[in-house]
Amino acid sequence: MIWKMIAAPLVGAVIGYFTNWIAVKMLFHPRHEMRIGGWRVPFTPGVIPKGQPRLARAIGDAVQTQLLTPEVMETILLSPEMKEKLADAVRRWIDERKSSEVTVEDAALKLADRDSLHELALFVRETGADFFYLRIKEMDLPHMLTEKIMDAAREKLSESMLGMMLTGNFLTGIGEMIEEKLDALVEDKGKEYLEKAIKNELDSLRKRRVGEGISLLDDNGFNLVDLTTEVYEMVIRQHLGQMMESLNLKKVVEDRINSMKVEEVEELVLAIMKKELGAIVNLGAVIGLILGLINIFIMNF
């Protein structure tokens, strides 16, 4: 009697363990479809080999819509730690090249071909123009210039007969007219002028020695580290969504998983969930043991 009471839970545990073990194995095996004559053996191939395209679509969708969204990537790329790493890299680059005799153009050609550099120059012109145009708008430069002009005019006219004849309202009207014209000029031609100015500077810079170019930027009040960081931040905020859309992470992940062999997919899943799948197998043994004990209790009581 005692052996029956011990054997029932043990048999239940063994059955539960091996049932779940077989179920887990059937997720991956058999890896290919099996046939007897024209009849396909049921449950072949295994669940994951059979559903690999669906798994690839699901993972790709999860990566793009939940894991690596533009919002998540922006938070990562614009974190203080990431911006500090960028600043440190730019500082090291500057320190290493301050004494360089190589021209900026020759140094750039070691990193990329002329077509790529041309595309980069266009990008710098457009991005730089956008950057400085926004700064001009934020500073309200037309208003600042008008104030300076009108202050100078009042000072010059203050002791003259003409100045005594001109009233404050008259000068204010002239100032408003000047500011309106400057606003229109910035709005209509601001980006165009900035792009031309940046192009001229780039054309001049590419013939200079690297060290000389860095010194020139410093002498003109350009902090290359701060400028690089600000442009980087602006590019991320304004263009990250478009870049990620062009990258199409969902398709990249989906194509990668679909191109993997079944064995590689199994290794990938096990690398992520080996512990959890082992827990499922062990849980089968526990459940089988509990059911065996319950069965003994029902049979004897």
Image (tube, grey):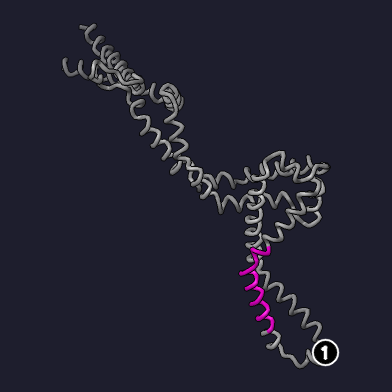
Instruction: Give neighbour class at mark 1: few <14, some 14-19, many 20+ (Cα, 10 Å).
Output: few
Identity of the residue drawn at 65% across and 64% down: 192
Left or right, 56 with respect to 237, comes to: left
Query: Which residue was labeled with disc 1?
Result: 160
Secondary structure at numbered mark 1: loop
Q: Is residue 204 above or below residue 1?
A: below
Query: Which image quarter is the N terminus in?
Result: top left
Residue that lies at the very extreme toward the front in this rendered image: 115
- Amino acid of disc 1: Ser
Residue 155 visible at all? yes
Identity of the residue drawn at 66% across and 85% down: 173
Identity of the residue drawn at 25% across and 9% down: 7
Total labels drawn: 1
Give percent across and percent down for residue 161.
81, 92
Q: Residue 210 is drawn in which quadrant?
A: top right
Q: Residue 60 is drawn in which quadrant?
A: top left
Q: Is residue 248 above or below residue 181?
A: above
Identity of the residue drawn at 23% across and 19% down: 38
Query: Which image quarter is the C terminus in?
Result: top left
Q: Residue 24 is drawn in which quadrant?
A: top left
Region rendered in magenta: 174-193
Left or right, 296 with respect to 130, comes to: left
